[in-house]
Image (spheres, helix red, strand yellow):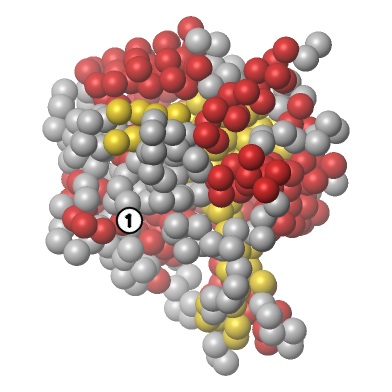
Amino acid sequence: MVSAALEETFSPPADSVLWRKDFLIGAATAAYQIEGAIHEDGRIPSIWDTFSATPGKTLAGDTGEFACDHYHRWQEDVELLASLNVGAYRLSISWPRVMTADGQKNQKGIDFYRKLLTALRAKGLKTYVTLYHWDLPQHLEDKGGWVNRDTAYRFAEYADMISRELHGLVDAWATLNEPWCSAMHGYGTGHHAPGKQDVVFATQAMHHLLLGHGLAVRHLRANDPSAQVGIVANVGRGTSTDASEAGQRAAWLFELQHNNWILDPLLKKSYPSALWELWPGAEPTILQGDMDIIGQPLDFLGINYYFRTNVVSDGKHGYTEVDLEGVERTQMGWEVYPDGLRHLLVGFHRDYPNLPPIYITENGMATDDKVVDGEVDDRQRISFLNRHLEAVNQAVKAGVDVRGYFIWSLMDNFEWAFGYERRFGIIHVDYSTQKRTLKRSAKLVTQFLAERNAKS
Ligand code: IFM
């Protein structure tokens, strides 16, 4: 059981890296999850509009049509964000909002982000901007989406256009958010848009996502030389209760598939060959020069971490997930396992000599939060944040260069296939009124950051 102290306060140990004022603490969101306004000001359809409008694809048939109505309430949201004393905000730009189907810019969409970023800067907040957080324009999916190599070039054009428009307003650009989810859930399992189900599609989509990343990096560097440029990967800890060689290989394969599939091409310019034993016949088509484009130096690597998975061997070349009994879980059913974050960070530091500085670009949890007498007492989240931040502190003490941490999420929002039921925010959103209520976690983070800022 979790200690009561961790649930009631947000107070890192005195020697924690969290007290350092240059250790960035921020909050994160993504365009489709909060903006709504999907038909306004020239925005064109995205794959998530199509997918979520398809019966049976999301819980309760929820869609991002209204979400948190951030497109209209962004000023109120910037005020709230600034009131938390955080140093940075991570957001994403909606590609279908800023670019027309014939590749021209959509000025109204661009103006929205210009106003937003300008307001954030005016509040002294650093801006961490992701270009692709899963909302591919539908017309590109109609031509094959990320399975089609051409999408990588269209993405590079979008990166070029938007970084010319918004240069000087962004502290750090991330090309992609979680290419693993885009490739595997979008084209392998079909749990996410566009809902395709073939591992051969998934591996080819991954290659084109990473190629698009590399092509975009060149434009971002050229157009906005003072901004940092990176990418965000979700990583998972895999372990096995089976101590046999087969069990341990299963756990290794899990991490290879989730982590090294993305990090190896980015940091070693090659895919791990064991992937093609796991997925025979699924090796993507790679053209000459691709791996050099993908493996260009990065200024930072964003790491998103949520849970651990227990696996056993499937008796062949793969693994099977087996839920552990009696462990703490979140509303998503994910195991709360803070040491997995420390373990992975230390492992990446050991295994990738050219590992760039790291930001934890997402970490947080869903709880079934309710407003009672104007308050939201999200104790499990407070404890979760305390324990994961301590895991980051331990990783830094072990020599890993972690520069910051973003809470997922600033506010409750559209949790993809799980719709609005799963609440990840430190700010509660009542979707019927759009009223925002600071949860206890948000209040404690605010208090801690005020204390930190007051220190000499
Ligand atoms: O809500 C998502 C986010 O969009 C990407 N990372 C994981 C979060 C929680 O599932």
Residue 323 image offset from top left, x and y in percent: 54, 76
Disc 1 marks a residue whose amino acid type is Phe
- Secondary structure of the residue carrying tag 1 is helix
Q: Nearer the viewer, residue 424 or 200?
A: 424
> Horizontal and vertical percent for residue 258?
56, 63
Q: Ligand 1 near label 1 (Cβ, under 8 Å)?
A: yes
Q: Is residue 11 visible?
A: yes
Name the foreground residue: 239 vs 215: 239
Examine the rendered structure and indicate whether residue 67 appears above or below residue 220.
below
Query: Hey, which quadrant is residue 372 in on the image?
Result: top left
Q: Nearer the viewer, residue 134 or 377?
A: 377
Seen in the picture, residue 5 relative to 119 is either above or below; the reply is below
Residue ID at (85%, 33%) = 15
Q: Tell me the residue at 23%/17% (across/down).
A: 107
Count how many numbered circles sit on residues in the image. 1
Q: Position of residue 218 (x, y in %)?
A: 51, 31
- Tell me the residue that label 1 is attached to: 418
Residue 284, image x, y percentages:
45, 65
Which image quadrant is residue 246 in?
A: bottom right
